[in-house]
Image (cartoon, rainbow, N blue to C red):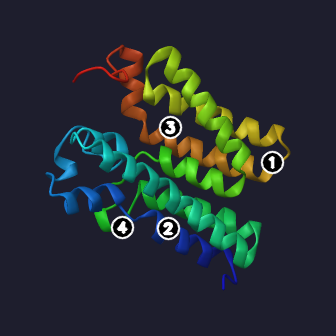
Amino acid sequence: MFPNGLIAFVFGYLLGSIPFGMILTRIAGTQDLRSIGSGNIGATNVLRTGRKSLAAATLIGDMLKGTVAVVIASLLSGPGAAMAAALGAFLGHLFPVWLKFRGGKGVATYIGVLLGLFWPAALAFCAIWLLVAFTTRYSSLSALLASLATPLVLWGLGHPQFASLFTVLTVLLWFKHRENISRLIAGSEGKIGAKA
């Protein structure tokens, strides 16, 4: 089914570019997601609509599209295709062709592809995220530090090829969070649970 990595990459990209936040909020009849908050299409911005159920569904959808892409590619063509699909799914979420390449920040899809490739590392990511979130109450900082640790975790657990892939994904995730990083440095980043 996937004779080469390019096909797996395109398959992953098409799945990853499904904008669940946009789709679910439109079905629910809320205002255009890109016109509120950060303008982002991810679960955090969906939460700003006041619809927790939609935010949860967006989070799950954005995770699972990465996981599904990886698992199908792996089953049909092995680990090389799975890695290509993982990269495609992540880039699809960040830069979806349907939304003029303006997508989300990638945390949920990052976890999803990690779950599909090597689930223990996904658990480590979530544990680090929760620890940092509990101590600092910064969601963005939690994601940044958890992603920074992920390639090291993968390398330490004997998966250097996955570590190389997630080094690239981490750089992309940090790039998409550059405004959050600026606010963290300035001390103006919003905290979890803080009123806008």
Name the residue at 62% across, 48% down. Answer: 168
Q: Kindly check if marks 1 and 3 are in contact, taking CB atoms under 8 A apart as contact.
A: no
Q: Is residue 140 above or below residue 82?
A: above
Q: Residues within 10 Å of mark 1 (few under 14, many from 20)?
A: some
Residue topped by disc 2 = 13
Q: What distance separates the C-alpha of mark 4 from that of mark 3?
A: 21 Å
Q: What distance separates the C-alpha of mark 1 from that of mark 3?
A: 21 Å
Task: Find numbered disc 3 in the image and state the secondary structure of the residue it sits on.
Answer: helix
Q: Earlier in the sequence, mark 2 or mark 1?
A: 2
Task: Find numbered disc 4 in the image and state the secondary structure of the residue it sits on.
Answer: helix
Name the residue at 70% across, 78% down. Answer: 76
Q: Kindly check if marks 4 and 1 are in contact, taking CB atoms under 8 A apart as contact.
A: no
Which numbered circle lies on residue 160? 1
Q: What distance separates the C-alpha of mark 2 from that of mark 1?
A: 23 Å
Task: Find numbered disc 1 in the image and state the secondary structure of the residue it sits on.
Answer: helix
User: For this rendering, which residue is in front, 51 or 156?
Assistant: 51
Mark nearer the viewer, 3 or 2? 2
Q: Residues within 10 Å of mark 3 (few under 14, many from 20)?
A: many
* Left or right placement of residue 185 versus residue 160 in this view: left
Q: If the image is split into quadrants, where does the N terminus sit?
A: bottom right
Residue 97 location, quadrant: bottom left
Name the residue at 21% across, 42% down. Answer: 49
Task: Find numbered disc 2 in the image and state the secondary structure of the residue it sits on.
Answer: helix
User: For this rendering, which residue is in front, 11 or 61?
Assistant: 61
Residue topped by disc 4 = 97
Residue topped by disc 3 = 174
Name which residue type carries label 3.
Trp
Q: Earlier in the sequence, mark 4 or mark 2?
A: 2
Q: Kindly check if marks 4 and 3 are in contact, taking CB atoms under 8 A apart as contact.
A: no
